[in-house]
Image (tube, rainbow, N blue to C red):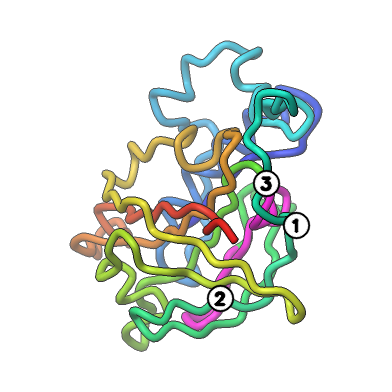
Amino acid sequence: MECVALRHKNNSRLLAILGSLLVILTACTPNIQEVATNNLPPESTNAPAEEIASFTEESKPSVNKSDAEPEKSPVTDITPTRLTIPAISVDAEVKPYGLNEDTGAMAVPEDGETVAWFEPGTKPGARGNAVLAAHVDDYTGPAIFFDLKELEVGDEIHVEDGEETLTFVVTRKEAYPYDAAPIRSIFGPTSNRQLNLITCTGLYDRKTNNHQERLVIYSELKET
C-alpha cells in the first residue's frame, strides 16, 4: 500500500525495490503477501539504469549553497514516531518499515491503526520525498487513513519524534489507478522537503483483493 527514495548501491537491487513499490501500492489489506517485483509500472520499466540510480541517497540532487535561499531557521530531519492530522482527527503511532526479506516487498502494518514510514527512504524534514502509508480499511472496518480523502490544500500534517514536531502543509492530492501510480513523483529525489501520505481508495474488488486506486496526499514542510 505504500512506497520510496532509496539508499541502495546497485541497480539490480534497486530494480527489485522499485518493483516492490508497486506491491506496496497494490497491497491494501493486512495479510496480502503476494509480490510482483518484475511488474514495474511503465514509467519505471523503460528507465535507463543511470536514471534509476538517481533514486539512491548518494545521487540525490545537491543544492548549491550560493544559489539556495537562506533558511528562515535551522531545519532538521527526524525519525517519526507519531502522526497527527487535526482536520481529520488522526492521531497515530508511526513505526519504521523496511523490506520483507522473504518477499522483497515493503513490510506493512498488520493492523489498521499503525502508520508505516519507509525507513530506507527519506526522513521527514530532509530534502526529498518522505513517505508515510497506512490502510484505509481492514477486515474489521475503517482504518486510520479512512478519511484521508477529506484533506484539502492548506491542511496541516504534524510529524513528531517525541522531542520535535515538524509541520507540513498539504499542497495537492491525487488518485491514481493502482497499477499506474507515478513512482518518481511520489518517491523520487527533490530539493524540496516533502512528505507524502499514501493509502488505497476507490472500489474494492473481492476477486483481486485490491482497491482500484491509490490516493496520494502531497505536502511540503512549513517554513518556520
Q: Is mark 3 on a helix, strand or loop?
A: loop
Measured Cα–Cα span from mark 1 to mark 3: 11 Å
Query: What's the residue type where badge 1 is placed?
Result: Thr
CA neighbours of label 3 inside 10 A, class few (<14), some (14 to 19), many (20+): few
Label placed on residue 83: 2
Instruction: Provide residue 164's location: percent of width, then percent of height.
Output: 72, 74
**Foreground: 167 or 104?**
167
| First along the sequence among labels 3 and 2 | 3
On screen, residue 43 above or below 97: above
On screen, residue 69 above or below 1: above
Instruction: Provide residue 16's location: percent of width, then percent of height.
Output: 63, 34
Measured Cα–Cα span from mark 3 to mark 2: 25 Å
Q: Give the range drawn in magenta.
A: 108-126
CA neighbours of label 2 inside 10 A, class few (<14), some (14 to 19), many (20+): many
Label placed on residue 71: 3
Q: Residue at x 62, y 78 (%)?
A: 82
Dividing the picture into quadrants, the one containing residue 182 is: top left
Q: Which residue is drawn at 46% across and 59% down?
A: 197
Residue 109 magenta: yes
**Foreground: 125 or 129?**
125
Instruction: Provide residue 190's location: percent of width, then percent of height.
Output: 57, 34
CA neighbours of label 1 inside 10 A, class few (<14), some (14 to 19), many (20+): few
Q: Residue at x 62, y 35 (%)?
A: 69
